[in-house]
Amino acid sequence: MPSETVLVVGATGNVGVSAVIGSLRSGRGVLAVVRNQASADKLFKHVGSKEGITTVEADVASESGVQGVVDQVKAGKLPAFQHVYSTVGMMIMKSPLQDVSTAELRKMMNVAVEGNFFAYRATIPYLIEQGHKSSWTLMTGWAGVTAIGQGALFSMANVACRENTKTNVRFNEVYLNLRVEVDSDAETKGGSVVPSSEFGRHYEELLKREDIEACRISILERADVADLKFRKKLG
């Protein structure tokens, strides 16, 4: 049995699959939040195994979604976790901005901003209460209309870094400026797309590097996946 577990929120997306793979390679178990059984099956397919992965269904865009997962953990119905990787989001590449509908904008803000905030609000008290050496990683980036919501996440990361400097939780932001896709899709698109299995290396490395805390890790080119480039979020 793994000694530690990573809660991956947004586990079935391209980056979420990477986080699951990186967690497993580090020798940790994974508690993966999925929408339904079909999503769970998709995750297992992309990872290539079910071993070490526990799945739980929840609506991460709902304020009760991840909180319900934490409640099940506290009740002993799910494995305890010591680390969180949150990569909740959706891609809206429509442009120019004036062509984006209000419904599209609100959905993006609900999923990308509220989803990650709800995950943070639900899990940070639990991690602090447990008292273990823990980490919380937030994935950010840029692309189309989605970038509007990223601005809010950048600020959220600043606040979280400051608030956790004296806790047991090592908070970091990973800023991604590469296209990542699950291996089967990346294979069809040539070298411009990074496969999820390769991108998982960044999280495997970050879990090892306890010296990286309250930082933005910038992954701007392929070499940055294994050779982490980081700077402090706070002056």
Image (tube, grey):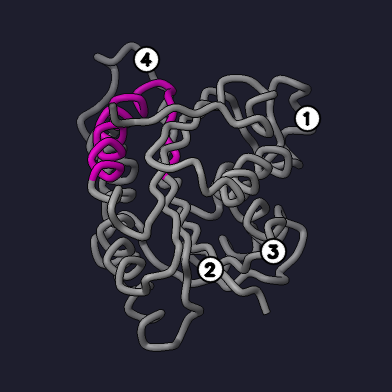
Which residue was labeled with disc 1?
188
Residue at horizontal 60 percent and vertical 27 percent from the top: 179
Question: To which quarter of the image does residue 192 belong?
Answer: top right
Q: Amino acid type of disc 3?
A: Gly
Which one is in front in this view, the residue at disc 4 or the one at disc 3? Answer: 3
Look at the numbered discs 2 and 1 and tell me whether their residues touch, using CB distance below 8 Å.
Answer: no
- Quarter in which the N terminus is drawn: bottom right
Any mark on residue 220, and which? none
CA gap between label 2 and label 1 equals: 30 Å
Q: Residue at x 55, y 68 (%)?
A: 5
The amino acid sitting under disc 1 is Thr
Mark 4: few/some/many CA within 10 Å (<14, 14-19, 20+): few
Expressed as whole percent of the image width and height from the top left, the position of residue 18 reads 63, 46
**For residue 27, which numbered disc appears in the image?**
3
Q: CA distance from mark 4 to mark 3?
A: 42 Å
Across and down, in percent, residue 147 comes to 35, 25
Q: Is residue 154 magenta?
A: yes
| Residue located 30% across and 48% down the image | 165
Q: CA distance from mark 3 to mark 2?
A: 13 Å
Q: Residues in magenta?
A: 138-162
Q: Secondary structure at mark 1?
A: loop
The mark lying in front, picked from 4 and 2, is: 2
Which label's residue is closer to the chain start, 4 or 2? 2
Q: Which residue is mark 2?
A: 31
Helix, strand or loop at label 3? It is loop
Relative horizontal placement of residue 193, taking residue 140 as reference (left or right): right
Label 4, on which residue? Answer: 95
Q: Nearer the viewer, residue 62 or 200?
A: 200
Which amino acid lies under the numbered mark 4 shown in the image of this protein?
Ser
Q: For the residues carrying marks 3 and 2, which lies nearer the camera in this image?
A: 3
Marks 1/3 in contact by CB < 8 Å: the verdict is no
